[in-house]
Amino acid sequence: MAEVRLQEGESLENALRRFKRKVQQEDIIKEVKRHSFYLKPGEKMRIKQALARKRNRKKARREGE
């Protein structure tokens, strides 16, 4: 659970910015989206394979440069 305490003399905007950064680093939003609906095991596998293909294409493109 992400928690940010307001430091003395810190503005609310800065604390909110720190909170957003912490939430993003801990992948809380990604986890919530992943649990918001059910994926069949086959669908989950296809999505995982598609992401792997995308990463490999991106990696190959970088190595080619």
Image (cartoon, rainbow, N blue to C red):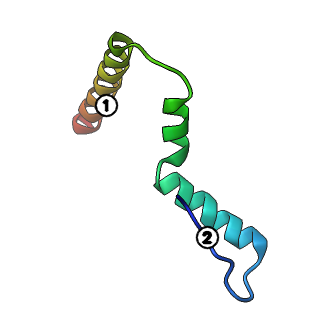
Residue 53 drawn above or below residue 1 = above
Q: Which amino acid type is shown beneath numbered disc 1?
A: Arg
Q: Nearer the viewer, residue 1 or 13?
A: 1
Q: Residues within 10 Å of mark 1 (few under 14, many from 20)?
A: few
At horizontal 27% and vertical 35% (from top left) the residue drawn is: 59
Q: Is residue 27 above or below residue 19?
A: above
Q: Report the side of 64 relative to 3 (left or right).
A: left
The residue at the point 62 percent across, 63 percent down is: 19
* Disc 1 element: helix
Q: How many marks?
A: 2
Residue depicted at 76% across the width and 68% down the height: 13
Q: Is residue 40 above or below residue 55?
A: above
Find disc 1 in the rendering and name its residue: 55
Sequence-wise, the earlier of marks 1 and 2 is 2
Q: Which residue is mark 2?
A: 4
The label on residue 45 is none
Which residue is nearer to you in this view: 39 or 16? 39
Looking at the image, residue 20 sits to the left or right of residue 64; the answer is: right
Q: CA distance from mark 1 to mark 2?
A: 33 Å
x then y, percent, for residue 31 = 48, 40
The reply, left or right, for residue 54 in relation to residue 35 is left
Look at the numbered disc 2 and give the secondary structure of its residue: loop
Residue 36 point in image, percent of width and height: 56, 28
**Foreground tag (1 vs 2):** 2
Which residue appears at 64% of the width and 76% of the height? 5
The quadrant of the picture occupied by the C terminus is top left
Q: Is residue 33 above or below residue 8?
A: above
Give amino acid for label 2.
Answer: Val
